[in-house]
Image: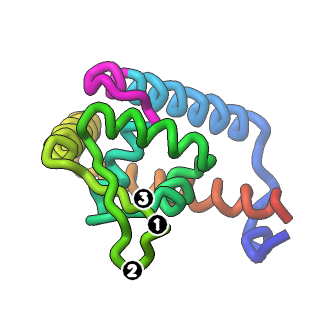
């Protein structure tokens, strides 16, 4: 077990664990619905949306690095980037430092699409947060960050 186990209070009532499970499963379902809605709205599969947003964070990216950032296989990166290229959203360039390497970047149309997606997502999350009482927003955000850290710690413990 990792150092996280040292601070863990194992006296969690079963009902609380069940409530957490239900809440996380419901949040996951909401996130899946949002991803499906975004895919439909922007006419891009979820992996292509993620790739586009990831490429929007940098000027150029090698396919291997894109795969690592997305957590997908090389063949999946090839399929996703081929689709984005056919749609005119990304382009491939030879790496000036190594002719064997191809670099990916957004086209002007890809940059516009990326900005539209980001604007949509910002509006969506702003709408969600606006439904929380203003004096409770920081607490909600802090709780979500704490939950993510705990989930990361448990996942790390399970890998050891």
When asked about the image quadrant of residue 17, the answer is top right
Q: Is residue 91 above or below residue 100?
A: above
Q: Which of label 3 and label 2 is nearer to you?
A: 2
Looking at the image, do the residues carrying marks 3 and 2 touch, with CB atoms under 8 Å apart? Answer: no
Q: Is residue 45 magenta?
A: yes
Q: Residue 100, relative to residue 148: is it above or below? A: below
Q: Earlier in the sequence, mark 3 or mark 2?
A: 2
Q: Judge by depth and name the residue closer to the eye, 97 or 138.
A: 97
Q: Quadrant of the N terminus?
A: bottom right
Where is residue 64 drawn, in percent x and y? Answer: 53, 60
- Which one is closest to the eye, mark 3 or mark 1? 1
Report the magenta residues as a range: 37-47
Of the pair 4 and 56, the residue shown nearer to us:
56
Q: Which residue is mark 2?
A: 97
> Residue sitting at 13 percent across and 48 percent down?
108
Query: Quick one: SS at disc 2?
Result: loop
Is 31 rendered above or below residue 13?
above
Check contact, mark 2 vs mark 1: CB within 8 A.
yes
Mark 3 element type: helix
Please state which of residues 18 and 50 is positioned toward the viewer in this rendering.
50
Q: CA distance from mark 3 to mark 1?
A: 42 Å
**Left or right of residue 67, residue 58 in this image:** left
Q: Which residue is mark 1?
A: 101
Looking at marks 3 and 1 on the same chain, the residue that comes earlier in the sequence is marked by: 1
Mark 3 lies on residue: 142
Q: Is residue 46 above or below residue 67?
A: above
Q: Residue at x 43, y 22 (%)?
A: 33
């Amino acid at each position: 077990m990792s150092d996280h186990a040292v601070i863990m209070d194992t006296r969690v009532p079963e009902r609380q664990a069940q409530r957490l499970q239900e809440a996380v499963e419901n949040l996951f379902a909401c996130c899946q619905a949002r991803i499906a809605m975004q895919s439909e709205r922007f006419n891009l599969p979820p992996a292509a949306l993620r790739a586009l947003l990831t490429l929007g964070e940098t000027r150029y990216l090698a396919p291997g690095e894109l795969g690592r950032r997305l957590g997908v296989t090389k063949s999946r990166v090839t399929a996703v980037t081929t689709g984005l290229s056919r749609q005119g959203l990304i382009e491939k360039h030879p790496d000036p430092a190594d002719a064997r390497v191809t670099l990916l970047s957004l086209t002007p149309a890809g940059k516009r699409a990326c900005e539209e997606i980001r604007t949509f997502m910002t509006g969506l999350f702003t709408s969600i947060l606006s439904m929380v009482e203003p004096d409770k927003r920081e607490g909600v955000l802090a709780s979500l960050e704490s939950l993510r850290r705990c989930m990361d710690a448990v996942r790390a413990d399970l890998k050891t």
